[in-house]
Amino acid sequence: MPTALTIAGTDPSGGAGISADLKTFSALGAFGTAVVTAVVAQNTRGVAAVHQLDGSTVAAQLTNLLDDVNVDVVKIGMLGTADVIDAVAQVLGEREVGPIVLDPVMVAKSGHRLLDADAVNALRSNLIPLCDLITPNLPEAADLLGTEETTSVTGMMRQVHALGELTGGVLLKGGHLDGEASTDLLLTGGRVTELSAPRVSTRNTHGTGCTLSAAIAALRPRSAGWEPAVRAAKDYLTGALRHADELSIGSGHGPVHHFWRAWD
Ligand SMILES: Nc1ncnc2c1ncn2[C@@H]1O[C@H](COP(=O)(O)OP(=O)(O)O)[C@@H](O)[C@H]1O
Ligand SMILES: Cc1ncc(COP(=O)(O)OP(=O)(O)O)c(N)n1
């Protein structure tokens, strides 16, 4: 069984961050390990407060883990500050770890910032070049590129190529567009592939981005490349969205159903 590491923030309501990542790893047959970057008071209605850990505390967790455990794949989520970004980049740059998937978490769907505005440059310059695949949503892509948020798949096509200048693998997620399909663009090996799934009508979408990037990480060690891992991860997420209304967690935007396959 591959060992997967998540480096991310917490979510007591279990839909996003480390909880979503560890459940996704378990559902998809990876052994989950975790390094905490921030303790977040959040529920399905939104974020109330963030207690950010400092870079040295995050680096200490990461170094201590990697001194002992062989990690086959890494998923990075919320980092919060340039201090934490630089600490993670320094440790990962010095260590032998498997492929790195980065979900460049910036703002929760409720609107609360989860990354300091002045940390985007550190993310772009210091961490992204170490990553094998980044998975921005449309507002994150616009921030990384310093451009307007795109409103079409044609615009996404231009942006995925521009993001490819930052690192070789990009999954640009189109969940924020309207339409009957939810379309993402995968750039890998210089080629763009369009991945579409029927848009699921549900209010329970908390943690979709976390779940997708964790699923890609869990599936990558057993896949022949990024494209099959991303396709299988998107199928898993679409099922988790389809089954989300079977859960009744909280009164806001509830989580997707990470264990839907066991109940299907
Ligand atoms: N209602 C939906 N139905 C099906 N897939 C969706 C839906 N909303 C988002 N997705 C998919 O979930 C993933 C996360 O998308 P997105 O919402 O863009 O990112 P984030 O959660 O980081 O804001 C993408 O693969 C996107 O296509
Ligand atoms: C700790 C933590 N990390 C990431 C997020 C953002 O999750 P995401 O998958 O983008 O979905 P929303 O939470 O924005 O619905 C988070 N909320 N908390």
Image (cartoon, rainbow, N blue to C red):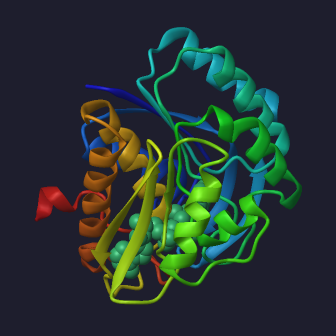
Q: Residue at x 51, y 10 (%)?
A: 68
Please tell me which residue lies in front, 238 or 16. Answer: 238
Residue drawn at (59%, 48%) of the image: 77
Tell me where residue 117 appears, x and y as whole percent. Answer: 85, 61
Q: Name which quarter of the figure residue 29 lies in.
A: top left
Residue 125: horizontal and vertical position, in percent?
78, 41
* Left or right of 88 in this view: 248: left
Asked if one can make out residue 95 in the rendered structure from this viewpoint, the answer is yes
Rendered position, 111 above or below 51: below
**x then y, percent, for residue 256:** 36, 68
Name the quadrant containing residue 95. top right
Q: Residue furthest right?
A: 118
Report the residue at 33% width, 88% height from top: 180
Residue drawn at x 67%, y 62% is 41
Q: Indicate left or right for 73 with 248 as reference.
A: right
Nearest the eye: 195 or 232: 195
Asked whether, in this view, residue 89 is left or right of residue 134, the answer is: right
Instruction: Using the image as rendered, state which of residue 16 and residue 133 is in the foreground.
Output: 133
Query: Quick check: which quadrant has ligand 2?
Result: bottom right
From this view, report whether residue 112 is shown above or below residue 129. below
Question: Which residue ends up furthest to the left in the rendered image?
Answer: 264
Q: Where's the C terminus, which quadrant?
A: bottom left
**Residue 14: x %, y % from top left:** 46, 59
- The answer to whether one can see residue 23 in this image is no
Q: Is residue 207 left or right of residue 147?
A: left
